[in-house]
Image: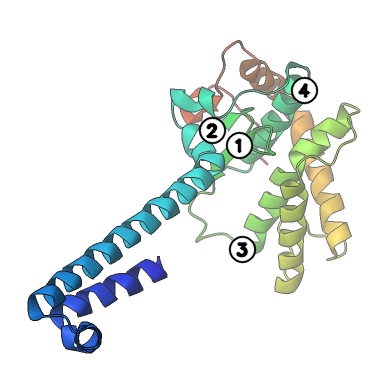
Amino acid sequence: MGTGILLLVIGFIAIIAPEIVLLPLSQMLALDARTTVQLSGFVLTICAVFRAVLWVFRRRDAGTAFSRSGAVALGAMGAGVAAVADRGDLETRPIRARHEAAHAVVALAFGMTVHRVDILVRNNSGGQVHWSAPDSRHCEPVDGMWARIVIGLAGMVVEHVDGVHDTGPDDDIRNAMLYAMKIICVGSRPQTYPMGELTVEGILTAASKEAERILDRNAEIVERIQARLLEPDSRGLRGPDLVEFDVIPV
């Protein structure tokens, strides 16, 4: 686009101040004044067309990138999502549904607001849980970090309990490690982690055990959410759909 703008500027200069660009050229070619003005208009037109062509190609490339990535997330907000995201392989649906149900249950146990849970396939993701934290002005930052770690590890933990030894999505592990390191940097302990070493290994191990305890207390709800996600033509559960699940809080 920078090239197109440069050419357009040159075209404007040719019209507004022809003495800078075109007069020397017209003198060299022995052109009269009328021909010089016509040449100025021609140059401006060519520059404008060239810039427009560049703009179209840039927009087309941007649109292609959007359709491959951002459109998937936005498509999940409506029924048109079927064109860009589906529920994936039938064989893996029960595992993915249980994985996402575990995330949702632990998030609810920590008092988070869960906006959506689904098993729609997006790029490398086999499902997502969208949640947000309530007003955190009256709680310590490390408690929020701890909650994020436990919620993030819940999917992997429930799979391990079921005998499926998979790390789960890389983002879950990466984010858990990131927040563990943040807790270490802060140097303060979460209220529900009063003992143990402030190391990444110690925090992740304790968080996994905490997730397992929460899931064990709410095992029935995990199964119910999993079943709802596996219903024919289910596109996931939204916030109002989760009100019926009375999750035991932390």
- On the image, the x and y values in percent for residue 245 come to 59, 24
Who is closer to the viewer here, 127 or 6? 6
| Residue bearing mark 2 | 116
- Between tags 2 and 3, which lies in front? 2
Residue 51 on image: x %, y %: 33, 62
Q: Where does the N terminus fall, quadrant-wise?
A: bottom left
Across the whole image, how many numbered discs are drawn on residues? Answer: 4
- Farthest residue to the front: give it: 30
Circles 1 and 4, Cβ within 8 Å, touching? The answer is: no
Q: Quadrant of the C terminus?
A: top right
Place of residue 55 in the rendered image (x, y in percent of width and height, measured from the top left): 37, 56
Q: Earlier in the sequence, mark 1 or mark 3?
A: 1
Q: CA distance from mark 1 to mark 4?
A: 17 Å
Q: Which residue was labeled with disc 3?
A: 141
Query: In the current view of this chain or complex, which residue is farthest to the left?
Result: 34
- Residues 115 and 42: in front is 42
Does residue 129 appear in this view? Answer: yes
The answer to which image quadrant residue 18 occupies is bottom left
The quarter holding residue 140 reads: bottom right
Quick one: SS at disc 3?
helix
Label 2 SS? strand
Disc number for residue 92:
4
In contact (CB < 8 Å): disc 2 and disc 1: yes
Query: Which is nearer the N-term, disc 4 or disc 3?
Result: 4
| Three-letter amino acid code of the residue under disc 1 | Val
Tell which circle, 1 or 4, labels the residue nearer the N-terminal end: 4
Identify whether 205 is placed above or below 164.
below
Residue assigned mark 1: 129
